C-alpha cells in the first residue's frame, strides 16, 4: 500500500467586525479572520496538506481569491472539494495532526466540535483528527492578536489497486 504525507500552513489577519471561523466552527470573539472566503485558517491548512501530499499545488491554485465564486465561501465546502480531489486520485485519509497558533481566544472548548466537522468531511474517526493550540507567549503578530496561524500534517493511503 502506498502512503503520502503532506504539510500545510495558513495565516490570516484578525480584525474587528469579522466572524472567527476555525475548524468549521464559529468561535465567539471580538475579532475575526480576514480573507476572501470565511478565512478558516485551520481548514485551509488541512486543504494545503492534502494537496501537497499528492503534488496537486496549493489552495490558491484550486480556489483563487480572484474568483468571485469563492467570495465568503464556507471553507467546509473547500475542504470537501479538496477531499474529493484526493479521492479521485485513489487516496483516503489516515490521520490529520494540526496546531493553531493564536493568543486569544482559548479554543479548547471548541476542539471537539472542530474534530467532528473535520472528521465528518474527511470520512475518518474523531481519533484520527488531532487539533492542538498554543499561544506565542505574546510574541509576534499572533501574540499581539493581529493574526493567527494553522499548521497541518496529513497522512494519505492509496485505496485503489
Image (spheres, rainbow, N blue to C red):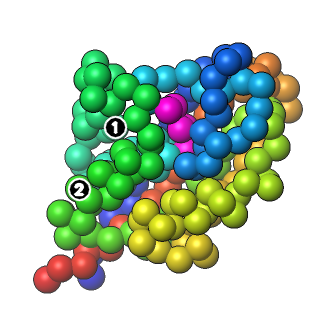
> Which of 113 and 42 lies nearest the eye of the viewer?
113
Residue 53 seen in render? no
Residue ranking furthest to the right: 137
Point out the stretch of residues depicted in magenta. Answer: 38-42
* Residue 53 within the magenta-colored segment of the rendering: no
> Which of 156 and 31 lies nearest the eye of the viewer?
31
- Vertically, is 72 above or below 120? above
- Vertically, is 69 above or below 80? above
Residue positioned 79% across, 19% down in the render: 144
Judged from the image, the secondary structure of the residue bearing numbered disc 2 is helix
Mark 2 highlights which residue? 85
Q: Quadrant of residue 158?
A: bottom left
Q: For the stretch drawn in magenta, what is the main secondary structure?
A: loop
In primary-sequence order, the first of circles 2 and 1 is 1
| In the image: residue 127, left or right of residue 86 | right
Judged from the image, the secondary structure of the residue bearing numbered disc 1 is helix
Give the x, y percent position of residue 59: 34, 37
| In the image: residue 124, left or right of residue 86 | right
Looking at the rendered image, the quarter that the C terminus falls into is bottom left
Residue ranking furthest to the left: 161
Amino acid at each position: 500500500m502506498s502512503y503520502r504525507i503532506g504539510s500545510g500552513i495558513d495565516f490570516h489577519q484578525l480584525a474587528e467586525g469579522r466572524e472567527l471561523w476555525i475548524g468549521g466552527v464559529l468561535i465567539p470573539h471580538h475579532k475575526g479572520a480576514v480573507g476572501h472566503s470565511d478565512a478558516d485558517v485551520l481548514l485551509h491548512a488541512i486543504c494545503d496538506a492534502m494537496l501537497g501530499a499528492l503534488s496537486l499545488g496549493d489552495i490558491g491554485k484550486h480556489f483563487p481569491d480572484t474568483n468571485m465564486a469563492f467570495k465568503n465561501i464556507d471553507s467546509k465546502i473547500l475542504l470537501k472539494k479538496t477531499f474529493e480531489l484526493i479521492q479521485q486520485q485513489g487516496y483516503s485519509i489516515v490521520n490529520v495532526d494540526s496546531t493553531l497558533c493564536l493568543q486569544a481566544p482559548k479554543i479548547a472548548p471548541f476542539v471537539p466540535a472542530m474534530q467532528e466537522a473535520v472528521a465528518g468531511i474527511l470520512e475518518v474517526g474523531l481519533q484520527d483528527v488531532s487539533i492542538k493550540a498554543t499561544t506565542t507567549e505574546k510574541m509576534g503578530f499572533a501574540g499581539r492578536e493581529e493574526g493567527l496561524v494553522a499548521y497541518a500534517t496529513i497522512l494519505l493511503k492509496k485505496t485503489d489497486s
